[in-house]
Amino acid sequence: MNLPTPALVTQRAAQRLPRWALMLLCAAYLLPGQFGREPWKNADITAFGYMSSLAEGRSPWTAPALAGLPGDGALLPYWLGALSIKALPFIDAANAARVPFALLLAATLALIWYSTQHLARTEAAQPVAFAFGGEASPLDYARALADGAVLATIASVGLLQLGHETTPELVQLSGVALFMWVLAAAPTRPRVAAGAAVVALTVVAASGAPAIALGLGASGFVICQFSRYPGALGLRAWLVLGMLAGALVAWEGHAWAWRAAFHWNSFWQLLRLGAWFLWPGWLLALWTLWRWRHHLTSRHIAVPSVGVAVALVASLSMGGSDRALMLAVPGVAVLAAFALPTLKRSAGSAIDWFSVFFFTALAIFIWVFYVGMMTGTPAKPAQRIAALLPGFEPHFSPSLLVLAVLGTAAWLALVRWRTARVQHALWKSLVLPATGVTLNLLLLLTLGLPAIDYARSYRPWVYLVAQHVPNGVCVAAQLPRSALAALENYSNWRIDAQGDVARNSECPYLLIDENRHALVSAPPGWTLVAHLHRPSEREESTAVFRKTTAPTPRPADFGRVALAR
């Protein structure tokens, strides 16, 4: 028995978001933060360290390493970054490494759009037919919902930082989005979906998440098992093949590792994290599950729900990991899109006005800080920056200022357009949240880029170390992998981090990570040289030691390390 759907959509409401506007919004979301900045602490520079290690031949391609320490088995992301570095030798290595990841984020948005379109065209997802006609056509309805899904993805707060890093999780995200498209398109495009299923599961497994790949494959198999579409039924064998391929790739890449860190408060941590990380999509996704509760087994609800469920279980088993939770974004965005045909006008107005006030206030705050940082008036923002980032000297960039002004003007024009007239499009309630997020991302990574770069880059810390360690020497290190990546990429030192370096290393200098409230004493055979800390860090510190038997360098030898770009 086919139950009536809760969607009441007129043809007027199924209008598409203008392509030029959608493309411009996606570009404004994708490009800031991808180029013209340093690799940031922690995961960003760690991943870049593995990529540059491969590109420069410091480690074999089958076993990426940092200072001799093996990687985490995520071979594919490191290969992509390293190949891009080698293919683009005429630009900075860090910028070159980000090119494939920017393309993957763009592909993720496209896959979410096409997945939603396929799911919205199924029979169970169609709006109610009116007695005298006038309901939305299936194609226009599907395209309008697909536009809404992309807007919901861009509006996701948790994707702001993690989606603009060069980390394995972004490759996993694109693999999850591809897998969702596979399940969505299988009834109408069975041959393409079959091959893409193997690719998607292999990509997720080769990016360091083989257990998630198996979870997706098994869940997809269950959906296909109970499907009435021949294309979906035929996908089952390919899902099994994809799981086997993913398991084999993970085995060869040594990606199988026990990362579970479940404890009793993991539920509470996941709840708190998800409340802001998946905002505002999770509210609309819950509304979808309620309004479409009689259609939970239909493809347009079941397919995205599978991806969300696997990501939630993975995050929960890892103690509330935000990087595992990021994999829920595609499914949440698709579910959020199906809330739009059932959303009351009062709820849409509440979303609009909250977005106007919140994102406008945040933009004003960023502008005030920028003006204070550049001119000293008002004084408090400048004093705050000086206290948080000692040694930082702001510099003016006309091009970044122009981009910030254009973005702010576009926001004001959009707010006027949205509030000056009654809009009927399905996607109208997500335009302001998505654009507000994009605006503030643009402002942060234009007006605030120099300060953020100084705060999150390891380069100032390497400069400090260079004042005490001569150029070209061997340096033993007991440091986080992010710091090891910075030392390998910003200096000419030979870094040794294997084993108990304080006892066994032949290097004349030793760096040890410490807490500023519990300083490390000199190990046997070593002499303390200095205690250092990154300018933006208040708790972390680094102890620099020199071997007692090593000759004391002349003062002229200090600080001569050639810091690489």
Image: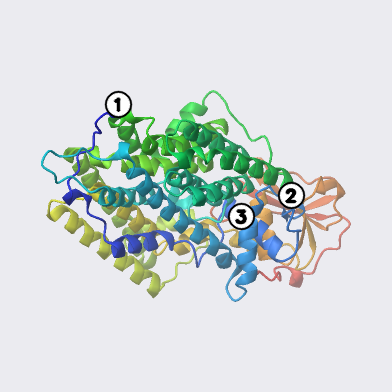
The residue beneath circle 3 is 77
The disc placed on residue 281 is none
347 or 304, nearer to the observer: 304
Looking at the image, is mark 3 or mark 2 nearer the viewer?
Answer: 3
Secondary structure beneath dot 2 equals strand
- Kind of residue indicated by mark 1: Met
Label 2 vs 1, first from the N-terminus = 1
Which dot, 2 or 1, sits closer to the camera?
1
Where, quadrant-wise, is the C terminus in this rendering?
Answer: bottom right
Where residue 475 sits in the image (x, y, percent)? Answer: 78, 58
Q: Position of residue 173 (x, y in %)?
A: 51, 48
The structure residue drawn at horizontal position 69% and vertical position 65%, both measured from the top left corner, is 55
In the picture, measured across the screen, residue 179 lies left or right of residue 136, that is right
Looking at the image, residue 159 sits to the left or right of residue 558; the answer is left
Q: Residue furthest right?
A: 549
Residue 365: image x %, image y %?
Answer: 32, 54
Residue 70 is labelled as: 2
Marks 1/3: CA distance?
Answer: 47 Å
Rendered position, 193 above or below 293: below
At x 30%, y 29%, the residue is: 290
* Precedes in sequence: disc 3 or disc 2: 2
Left or right: 556, with 313 as reference point: right
Real-space Cα distance between discs 3 and 2? 15 Å
Residue 405 visible (yes or no) = yes
Residue 1 got which mark?
1
* Amino acid at dot 2: Pro
| Residue 263 percent coordinates (x, y) | 57, 25
What amino acid type should be assigned to the residue bearing mark 3? Pro
The kind of secondary structure element at disc 3 is helix
Q: Quadrant of residue 462?
A: bottom right
